[in-house]
Image: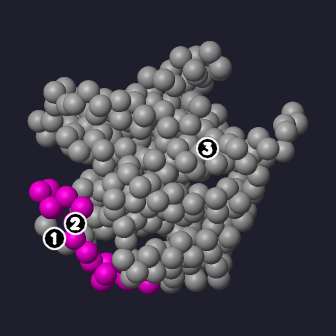
Amino acid sequence: MDHPRWILPVFLALGMLSISSSAIFVRLCDDAPPVVIAAARLGIATLILVPGLTLARGPSLRRIPRRLWPHILLGGAMLAAHFFFWMTSLRHTSVLSSVVIVTTNPIFVGIGSLVFFGERARRNLVLGIALAAAGGALITLAGGPAPDPARASGSTVYGNLLSLLGALTASGYLLIGRRVRADVDNLSYMLGVYGVAALILCAAAVAQGASFTAYRPITYLYFLLLAVAPQLIGHGSLNYALRHLSATLVAICILAEPVGASLLAYLILGESADRWQAAGAALILGGIFLAGRADAAPRPKNIEPDPRSD
């Protein structure tokens, strides 16, 4: 089906704006612990997907082969860990550092593809890893005050490490998805892993003694916006673009997220980066760009581009 030429740019712009807002909404939910924010985001997204999937596909979940459910459970666990680590990192480091570091997951996906799928190492991937490592070291050495001294020490290193764990777990989620989505449609897979992740995060919140009530009314609005904007609209727009553009081109567009998130952080939160943090971020983005170019093999059309994506 042909679409007007302006449709794709609009969808990509909408997707990037929605995803870039994720870190801002998390920061604005400052009266709720990260585990509750993550559980609310995925829980609400799951509840919205249920009627949509039922109307669009019928009982699709019943057609998921039983042999793939362990993969979906593991994928959900990885997704839950990703959001927990990344959202917690935003309490200890800047939006720029957190979002740039968590966006390095294409590099770890490339490494995992070498290890688990036997894909050939490409020069661009090696160069991308080197650039990203240099940028990460520069951001860490630059330091800077924690965004919330009441919740963290003066160092941002802990937050940067949490963001790195978020990138690693997001990579595990994507690698598992590469196997499962060859046999399962995208909406069914999304509902499965979102639901599993939401249940895990709810259980973790209960285990920590966290409450899902008594927050400011505006916080619940931010929960809803997190589920609708970055989780559903953001990922959905990029997935639509993947049907009409190469995965490499869409991956390059995703590099706009740290830029958009940093701009929103400056306008809304009054947060800015020093020149060394900006230089480190530029090196990491260059590394991600090279790693994305290394992953030029054809991929299934219904692949959700990036959960962190955040």
Q: In this view, does 63 lie above or below 226?
A: above
Mark 1: which secondary structure?
loop
Work out whether residue 192 can be spotted.
Answer: no
Residue occupying image coordinates x 49% and y 42%: 230
Residue 152 in percent (x, y) is at: 15, 61
N-terminal-most mark, 3 or 2: 3
Circle 2 residue: 146
Circle 3 residue: 14
**Amino acid, disc 2:** Ala
Rendered-image quadrant of the N terminus: top right
Circle 1 residue: 154
Q: Marks 2 and 1, Cα distance to the nearest angstrom? A: 5 Å
Residue occupying image coordinates x 56% and y 37%: 233
Residue 240 in percent (x, y) is at: 69, 41
**Amino acid, disc 1:** Gly
For mark 1, does the 10 Å Cα neighbourhood hold few (<14), some (14 to 19), or many (20 or more) residues?
some
For mark 3, does the 10 Å Cα neighbourhood hold few (<14), some (14 to 19), or many (20 or more) residues?
some
- Which region is colored magenta? 133-152
Work out whether residue 140 can be spotted.
Answer: yes
Residue occupying image coordinates x 24% and y 61%: 147
**Amino acid, disc 3:** Leu
